[in-house]
Image: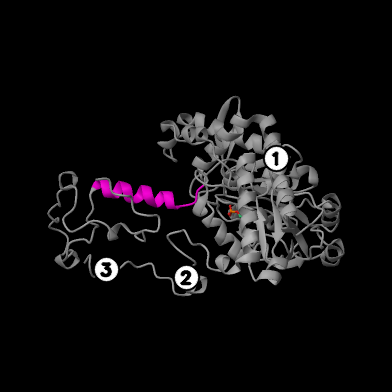
Amino acid sequence: MRRPSPPPSDPRVLIFERGAPGRVNAPQMPRPLAPPADIPSTLLRRAPLALPQVSELQVVRHYTRLSQRNFAIDTHFYPLGSCTMKYNPRAAHVAAQLPGFANRHPLAPESTGQGVLACLFELQEMLKDVTGMRAVSLTPMAGAQGEFAGVAMIRAYHAARNDLARDEILIPKAAHGTNPATAAMCGYRVREIDVRADGDIDLVALNAAIGPRTAGLMLTNPSTLGVFDRHIEDIAQRVHAAGGLLYYDGANLNAILGQVKPGDMGFDVVHLNLHKTFATPHGGGGPGAGPVGVGERLLPFLPVPMVGESGGRYYWITEKTRPQSIGRLSTFAGNVGVLLRAYVYARLVGREGMARIAHYAALNANYLLERLSRLGFEPAYPGRRAAHEFLLTLKGLKERTGVTALDVAKRLLDKGYHAPTIYFPLMVPECLLIEPTETESRDEIDGFVAAMAEILAEAETTPELLKAAPHTLPVRRVDEVRAARALDLVWKAHPASA
Ligand SMILES: *Cc1c(COP(=O)(O)O)cnc(C)c1O
């Protein structure tokens, strides 16, 4: 008789909760070895290791089911604003995992690694091209580490000129939290700049803050509000006139690839999030790569190693020839696997493809913004064209129905959609930051619109349904305060299975 598979609400998420005593794949298990005589008996295990007692088939089913309970870009629309959760072509993974790459020892000599060095060199060149910068170092291993490298270079630049009174970094209120954290880690005082109601930087506030203490300005453009600051040339001019440098947070580069270059906007240093813009799966916080590019003034300070080329031979550029470098950020060359994926991706799409990425990212975002606005959702910056993502505010909905951004996000899970980013940026109340990315089809986006329409109707008629969502997932509404304050990650044997 065919037994139904466990319903999706089967609460057993731990492998220990399955199986029964003695149910192991005995023939396949290595026999326990006798302990070596030189291990003191006090260090020897007294009771057998509490391994789960499950058959191979149970293990396969358990982990396959767990993977299906997850939301992933391979299974679900994933409009997580600011994170650019786009589809990563399999070809990039396959190429990056070629044995010649994957098995290479990081200390192997240059002469045996000309292929991988050539790829990294070409990636540096391509990133110079898309950012309009003079040179690129690939070594930072995340956007945040790229930021650290960038601000450390700004600090090194001022120090090299003996311009030591500059102790402030200006950062707009809308910025990602890593920006002020970076400035503080580099020893700077953070000065917040207001953003106007239309999403652009408040130039009056900027003027008031700029001065002889200004080391630099960190800016994301398009910003995390989803709009492109129209006064960027003016801003760059003002910061430079005061002797400061401009830092470009490139997390939103997806929006402007092949359209406009940070170098042309006047920036002196940029970081890119290759895991966002250039194809690397980055759920759960990693892995990533945050290369930095610089203009003329910061060239001597780039982190090492970089890759150089001379007469068709590729070589590592190290601190030996770069005495002013801010130094190393990792033991070897950074996350080379991620760099190779980015390289293959860039080669796959080509220069024309780069421009298409931004076109479709912007088209999808603006189409979705328009459809949701017509349903009655309220854009946080009405009248502004979305860059590649946009902000809605549910302030009005909350006042009317009590339904919050969190409730809508949880209800979306019931309907088969990963939630957008919520409550970020902090300055916009009850916000959803929605980024469909260029890799979604119109069908997929229309499905999301339909789900949002249903949720809006539910908010008006049965708000309590939303307050208790999700209803269909194995884990229901989590008490977030308890989850943070009383986190319990230790598994204890259930009396029945002990
Ligand atoms: C993601 C992001 C960062 C940080 O990048 P990580 O790679 O996560 O360290 C910085 N700024 C913005 C705007 C981002 O979206």
Please tell me which residue lies in front, 386 or 156: 386
| SS type, badge 1 | helix
Asked if the residue at label 1 sits under 8 Å from ligand 1, the reply is: no
Please tell me which residue lies in front, 349 or 216: 349
Instruction: Find residue 358 and name its label.
Output: 1
Q: In the rendered structure, does residue 196 fall within the stretch colored magenta?
A: no
**In the image, is 100 to the left or to the right of 383?**
left
Question: Mark 2 sits on what residue?
Answer: 483
Residue plotted at (52% across, 57% down): 414
Amino acid type indicated by mark 2: Ala
Residue plotted at (69% across, 58% down): 155
Q: Single out the residue that lies furthest toward the top.
A: 311
In primary-sequence order, the first of circles 1 and 3 is 1
| SS type, badge 3 | loop
Q: Residues within 10 Å of mark 3 (few under 14, many from 20)?
A: few
Amino acid type indicated by mark 1: Ala
Magenta residues span: 56-72
Compared to residue 345, the image places residue 77 above or below, namely below
In primary-sequence order, the first of circles 2 and 1 is 1
Question: Mark 3 sits on what residue?
Answer: 494
